[in-house]
């Protein structure tokens, strides 16, 4: 079975299970929040949305990673597309988000996933050299306060650190650490100019679990035992609520790579 075919089969099985099961805490399955059905060619049927909202209270269709379309023509739609890092992502064709939060300060960084990754308005001043590996993690300018970690870590997607350094699955059982943003994509992942490498911090991060969706990793890339008997195809290892096209997040949370994360915007 091809990667796309397996992805569609697993996702369809999961969505069907959601439709037949009571919604879990905080979900709104079956209420019109995101009644999206994948079809055989990897496209999607029209989606509807009531005012319960999904990630960052945006309606389905507000971003290119939630509009039910194959915007980059790779046969994979929205959450099935490995270059979509979450529902706030407005760029389905690259690992950039297409939103102002992609900005990088030449000297200092703060939380990437709050839509404003510039210098230090989140109670953190993290040297850019710590992110690029020019400075060792032991440098005082690479040390994070407990208050900052408490703020940023709950909104950091699977496989990423708090500064947008993410381990991208290359599809060959290996990962590369890249800085999110710009024109980096699966197609040019080996181009270190387009896809600058980075040194993730372990002080504030969300490591990619074995059965979690992460940048570059789709449902088709997960081990078969992650979906026993055709059930839930992916996991959220830190106790977050699982989200999908039919199971939205509660108010104040965003659906990022299949997990409900605290909305930092």
Image (spheres, rainbow, N blue to C red):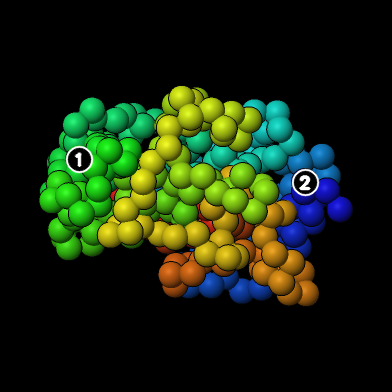
200 relative position to 47: left or right: left
Tell me, yes or no, whether the two marked residues, 1 and 2, touch with CB atoms within 8 Å.
no
Name which residue lies at 61% across and 44% down: 170
**Front residue of 193 and 108:** 193
Local SS, label 1:
strand
**Disc 2 crowd, CA 10 A, few/some/many (<14, 14-19, 20+):** many
**Front residue of 136 and 109:** 136
Q: For mark 1, what is the residue?
A: 127
Name which residue lies at 49% across and 69% down: 237
Local SS, label 2:
helix
Furthest residue toward right = 1
| Number of numbered discs visible in the structure rendering | 2
86 relative position to 44: left or right: left
Residue 119 image point, x, y percent: 18, 35
Q: Which mark is residue 4?
A: 2
In the rendered image, is residue 21 in sight? yes
Name which residue lies at 23% across and 59% down: 149
Q: Which mark is residue 74?
A: none
Alpha carbon separation for disc pair 1 and 2: 40 Å
Q: Quadrant of residue 181?
A: top left
**Picture quarter with the C terminus:** top left
**Front residue of 212 and 187:** 187
Q: Is residue 98 above or below residue 219?
A: above
Q: Quadrant of residue 48?
A: top right
């Amino acid at each position: 079975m091809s990667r796309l075919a397996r992805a569609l089969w697993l996702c369809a099985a999961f969505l069907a299970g959601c439709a037949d099961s009571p919604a879990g805490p905080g979900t709104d399955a079956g209420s019109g929040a995101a009644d999206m059905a994948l079809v055989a060619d990897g496209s999607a049927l029209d989606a509807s949305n009531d005012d319960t909202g999904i990630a960052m209270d945006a309606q389905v269709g507000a971003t290119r990673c939630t509009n039910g379309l194959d915007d980059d023509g790779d046969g994979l739609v929205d959450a099935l597309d490995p270059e979509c890092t979450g529902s706030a992502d407005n760029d389905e064709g690259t690992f950039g988000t297409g939103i102002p939060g992609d900005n990088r300060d030449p000297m200092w960084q703060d939380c990437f996933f709050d839509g404003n990754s510039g210098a230090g308005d989140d109670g953190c001043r993290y040297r850019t050299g710590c992110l690029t590996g020019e400075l060792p993690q032991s440098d005082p300018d690479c040390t994070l306060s407990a208050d900052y970690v408490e703020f940023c870590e709950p909104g950091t997607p699977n496989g990423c650190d708090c500064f947008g350094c993410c381990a991208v699955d290359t599809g060959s059982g290996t990962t590369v650490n890249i800085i999110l943003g710009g024109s980096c994509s699966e197609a040019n992942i080996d181009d270190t100019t387009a896809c600058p490498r980075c040194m993730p911090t372990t002080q504030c991060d969300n490591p990619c679990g074995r059965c979690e969706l992460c940048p570059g990793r789709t449902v088709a890339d997960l081990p078969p035992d992650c979906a026993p008997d055709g059930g839930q195809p992916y996991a959220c290892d830190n106790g977050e609520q699982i989200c999908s096209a039919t199971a939205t997040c509660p108010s104040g949370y965003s659906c990022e790579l299949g997990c409900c994360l605290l909305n930092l915007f």
